[in-house]
């Protein structure tokens, strides 16, 4: 009985929320490819949520097979003339087609149609995230706090630099920080990176250099994170907490800003890993996403929807990386085709696809190893 309860808890608490979030994000991504491909007159053989053996599916009146597959860790649209789910072109098959059929293949379409169709997947992910954030801001407003320092941690970088309670943070490194959240967002990804904090004190403007400390914090679920901290905080007693009511246009703009922050934070984190400033232990794969989905689901549907928005931005960004088999790799080939005036050679593409697939598989194994290490640690 205990075993069955454990299985039920795992299924309802983690797997179901994970599948809801991932399926939404994957479906929207692939729908972007599908809609623009259809609009461009490209034939579509398969629309699959998941990989591997088909669990359930049907054929529509256009001849497309819509299906849900056994491995729910992605999805694909297979265009007419593709050799496989990774959109590797079937050169021999396309060559043997009639001119009419060849015009309906992805490979035989105008390069700009291929660019639009491939780019539509990541763009759809960004649009989904922006809309989710915009809806949440429209419904609940935007909670903000002015960047007024209420408390300073003893022994912190802020105390050593001479910051005082009552100081108002105006800018950091010349970048305006109108809210306390803007301060956190700027400082958090910069542990041990010198910054200059501009404050207002008694009507005077002062520039104070300091270095955020690398600190380990825990979120509300007990997950440990390494961030940069300067040791300042605010509190409701200062009277600067409020919720801004946003009209649809403002909410949409905040949705764009929230999505852009995720992209910039991701780029900054990866860049810090490359230069050795950050450890890759904050990366996450399917296990990590499932864990986060279960944790966030306890906060309600709205929180789970916001996680879907974050994941949607991440998947959209990941797919734009210039790695063959990913959308970004295809776009690199099309850019080369536009510059050269002819497609990249068959052998070059085949080799590149094999290398790209190897890189993606190694990345998946790496993040899964991090997930497992974090789980058993």
Image (spheres, helix red, strand yellow):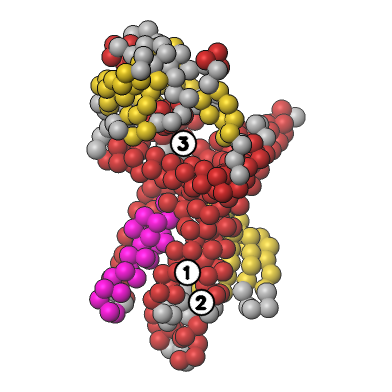
Q: What residue range appears in magenta? A: 318-342
Residue that appears at 72% across and 31% down: 5
Q: Which of marks 1 and 2 is nearer the N terminus?
A: 2
Task: Look at mark 1 in the image and give the residue it sits on.
Answer: 117
Task: Determine if residue 67 is in view.
Answer: yes
- Near mark 3 (Cα within 10 A), the count class, few <14, some 14-19 or many ≥20, is many
Residue that appears at 38% across and 60% down: 328
- Looking at the rendered image, the disc whose residue lies closer to the viewer, 1 or 3, is 1
Give the structural element (helix, strand or loop) at label 3: helix
- Residue 322 in percent (x, y) is at 34, 58
- Find the distance from the CA under tag 1 to the CA under tag 3: 33 Å
**Image quarter of the C terminus:** top left
Task: Determine if residue 21 is in view.
Answer: no
Hey, which quadrant is residue 268 in on the image? Answer: top left
- Near mark 1 (Cα within 10 A), the count class, few <14, some 14-19 or many ≥20, is many
Task: Look at mark 2 in the image and give the residue it sits on.
Answer: 40
Task: Look at mark 3 in the image and give the residue it sits on.
Answer: 371
Q: Which of 257 and 237 is in front in this view?
A: 237
């Amino acid at each position: 009985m205990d075993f069955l309860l454990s299985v039920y808890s795992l299924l309802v608490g983690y797997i179901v929320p994970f599948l809801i979030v991932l399926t939404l994000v994957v479906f929207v991504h692939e729908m972007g490819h599908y809609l623009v491909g259809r609009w461009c007159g490209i034939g579509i053989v398969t629309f699959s949520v998941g990989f591997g053996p088909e669990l359930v599916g049907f054929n529509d009146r256009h001849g497309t097979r819509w299906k849900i597959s056994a491995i729910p860790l992605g999805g694909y649209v297979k265009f007419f003339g593709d050799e496989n789910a990774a959109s590797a072109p079937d050169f021999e098959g396309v060559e043997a087609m009639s001119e009419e059929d060849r015009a309906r293949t992805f490979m035989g379409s105008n390069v700009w149609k291929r660019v639009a169709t491939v780019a539509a997947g990541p763009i759809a992910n960004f649009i989904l995230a922006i809309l989710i954030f915009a809806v949440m801001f429209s419904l609940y407003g935007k909670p903000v706090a002015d960047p007024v320092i209420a408390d300073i941690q003893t022994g912190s970088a802020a105390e050593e630099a001479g910051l005082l309670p009552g100081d108002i943070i105006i800018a950091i490194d010349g970048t305006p920080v109108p809210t306390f959240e803007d301060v956190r967002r700027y400082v958090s990804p910069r542990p041990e990176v010198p910054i200059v904090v501009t404050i207002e004190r008694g009507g005077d403007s002062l520039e104070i250099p300091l270095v955020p400390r690398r600190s380990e914090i825990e979120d509300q679920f007990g997950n440990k994170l390494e961030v940069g901290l300067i040791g300042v905080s605010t509190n409701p007693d200062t009277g600067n907490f409020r919720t801004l009511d946003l009209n649809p246009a403002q909410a949409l703009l905040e949705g764009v800003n929230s999505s852009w922050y995720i992209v910039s934070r991701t780029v900054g984190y990866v860049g810090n890993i490359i230069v050795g400033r950050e450890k890759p232990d904050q990366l996450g794969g399917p296990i990590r996403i499932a864990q986060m989905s279960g944790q966030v689901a306890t906060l309600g549907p709205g929180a789970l929807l916001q996680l879907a928005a974050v994941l949607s931005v991440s998947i959209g960004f990941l797919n734009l990386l210039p790695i063959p088999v990913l959308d970004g790799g295809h776009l690199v080939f099309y850019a080369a085709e536009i510059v050269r005036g002819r497609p990249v050679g068959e052998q070059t593409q085949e080799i590149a696809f094999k290398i790209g697939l190897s890189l993606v598989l190694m990345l998946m194994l790496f993040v899964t190893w991090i997930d497992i290490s974090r789980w058993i640690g």
